[in-house]
Amino acid sequence: MKSALRLAMLSLLTCTPAYSHEVEAGSVLICDTQEQVERFVQLFDGDRQLAINAVNVEEHDLNACAVVDVTYVTGAPIGVARNSSFAFEITPVVVIGTATARGYRPVKPTLYLSPMILKEFAV
């Protein structure tokens, strides 16, 4: 898994178009694996926390997916997941800081995946 994580981080940094990534701060939903993101999307019916809890129970890991308050950099989407009502881009997120009582503090960069809502329009 660590080699896959390194490869994903390397591709995030080297395989995207030549532009700078902006550091974002705030709450973001992150999951450990693409399969967990896809399962979240299958279960999501508008209640984010209910879908997160269901994924975590299935994974036997209370932190498999979570909403966290962090600083992060997003990469290029790696896929799209849909259910009957919603579509999400599966996006790599590198967490570089965490919120504390004294503001955001740097942490060792860690790669996660996030479902980012995708607005689709009928044509």
Image: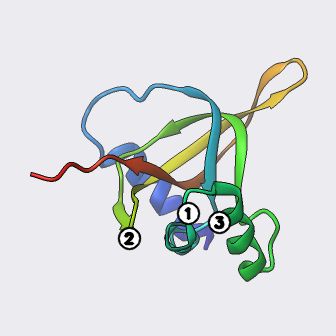
Mark identifier at residue 51: 3
Figure coloring: rainbow
Label 3 residue SS: helix
Front residue of this view, candidates 9 and 24: 24
Which residue type carries mark 2? Answer: Ser
Q: Earlier in the sequence, mark 1 or mark 3?
A: 1
Which residue type carries mark 3? Answer: Ala
Rendering coords of residue 92 (x, y %): 48, 52
Q: Is residue 58 left or right of residue 84?
A: right
How many C-alpha atoms fall within 10 Å of the one at disc 2: few (<14), some, or many (≥20)? few
Which residue type carries mark 1? Answer: Leu
Rendering coords of residue 10 (x, y %): 44, 52
Q: Which numbered mark, 1 or 3, is in the foreground of this view? A: 3
Snapshot quadrant of residue 70 = top right
Front residue of this view, candidates 15 and 81: 81
Label 2 residue SS: loop
Q: How far apart are marks 2 and 3 (CA)?
A: 15 Å
Residue indicated by mark 2: 84
Q: Earlier in the sequence, mark 2 or mark 3?
A: 3
How many C-alpha atoms fall within 10 Å of the one at disc 3: few (<14), some, or many (≥20)? some
Q: How far apart are marks 1 and 3 (CA)?
A: 25 Å
Q: Earlier in the sequence, mark 1 or mark 2?
A: 1
